[in-house]
Amino acid sequence: MNTDIYKSVAQSYTEILPQNQESLLLVVWLYQKILDGDIPHEFTKRDFDDTLDDVLVLLENPKSIQKELLSRKISNYYYRTIPFKNEYRIHLTIFAENLCKLVIEQLQPQIKRLALIHTFRRTLKLTDEDLETIESLEYWHEVNFNSAKNEILSHIEILQKNVSDKTNELRQLLKPDVDNPKGLIQDFIDVFETLKKQTVGLLNTINFKNETLQKIQSVKDKFSETPESFEKYDMIQRAFENFFDNIDRRIISINEKIQLASKRLRNLIDTLKYKQQFKVNIEKLLSYMLKTSKHEQGQIIVDEQIPIRQLLTLPTKFLAVPLIDFKIQNDATPEIPPQDPEHLERERQKNLQMLKNQEQTAKWLDKMEQGIAKGEEINYTEWFDKIAQSEGNLEVPIKVCFGIIESCNNSDTKRIELEQEHQKTRNKNVTLWKMTIHNTDS
């Protein structure tokens, strides 16, 4: 680039860029009023003064800002005055309008409802006429491709920003003082569902890109006849491939963030569900205790069916402040409080049973997966009875059921058929719907 341009920027950057937030806000407000139809494109001095008053009211400190000084800070790069009858009219320059457009789009990012594939088909459509000569292909590259790149990148950048903002807001739900977390989670679910649809739209554009690239590659021999035409063709092909390699990476990154945020949402929903169930159980317990407990001789006697457990204290507790002195040896030792051996043994057995159930769940899932892979039809009612009888509990078969459903939802080769037909099990308290699992490849 010519060094004179750099010198010009160094000398006049204070004029072509807003000097303070008040000046930028005034220009943007005028631009927005023109878009909304509140003032004409060539507005009057009164329109200008009214907008200036709006800016001062918004800043909530009008005494510290003088109107005349603020209006003079707007450079001629932002507006022009033209005679109109017996007065003057004012209009924003193209530079000011483009600047305001960029500012508003950046501060108020809105993802377009139409999928990006429509933009591709409209701006990047490559016809047979575009492939007839190297000149027509160059024209398509300069006019269609280069102009569409900015719109594509802008769309993806806005999507990235929305995903990052919503993910950061999602972390705030982990705080204990959040009001109505269930409602907020539902709002986030709706937002991320919309983002998923946008990502699907972006992924669909990759297919369109591949088709366009194949068209370009199909005329390679045609434009290899002369070094000049091949050089232009090679430049266009490499520019197309490099640009969309970058797009592919960005789309994959966005999709990973959305999937991670969606998983975090599901975990939050599960947490709230368990908390709600715990709250209900506590309310039931308290209600039962209020009805059955008695007050005798200054003491509260609870119902015999409610077992009383002694709360465990900290395993180590210092009963004296240690004396920190290099000359005197500190003999203060912590007193180990007595522990409940029955409670410790129950906790140990509980943990061992939990580990055993997890191990057995994994083994039964492997057996079912092997059967599905062989093309066998899995009737889960039969498996439920088999697992429950073998393990002697209902926890393992229920976990196996959830595991096989999740496995099928994440697989393209397995399908679940569910019929609302009650299936009796060996356990009289459990009734299942008919559920069969198939291998779609068989």
Image (tube, rainbow, N blue to C red):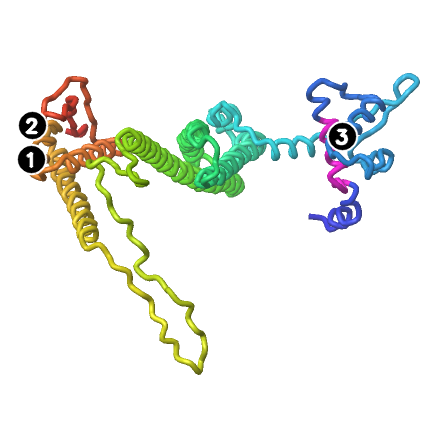
Q: Is residue 364 magenta?
A: no
- Span of residues in magenta: 16-31
Q: Earlier in the sequence, mark 3 or mark 1?
A: 3
Distance of label 2 from label 3 (alpha carbons):
76 Å
In the image, 274 versus 40, the foreground residue is 274
Label 3 packing within 10 angstroms: few (<14), some (14-19), many (20+):
few
What x and y, as percent, mark residue 372?
14, 33
**Three-letter residue code for mark 2:** Arg
Q: Residue furthest bottom?
A: 327
Residue 111 relative to residue 310: left or right: right
In the image, 154 versus 353, the foreground residue is 353
- Identify the residue at image location x=83%, y=21%: 44
Mark 3 = which residue? 57
Quadrant of res 84: top right
Q: Earlier in the sequence, mark 2 or mark 3?
A: 3
For label 1, the SS is helix
Mark 1 = which residue? 389
Mark 2 = which residue? 426
Question: Residue 259's mark?
Answer: none
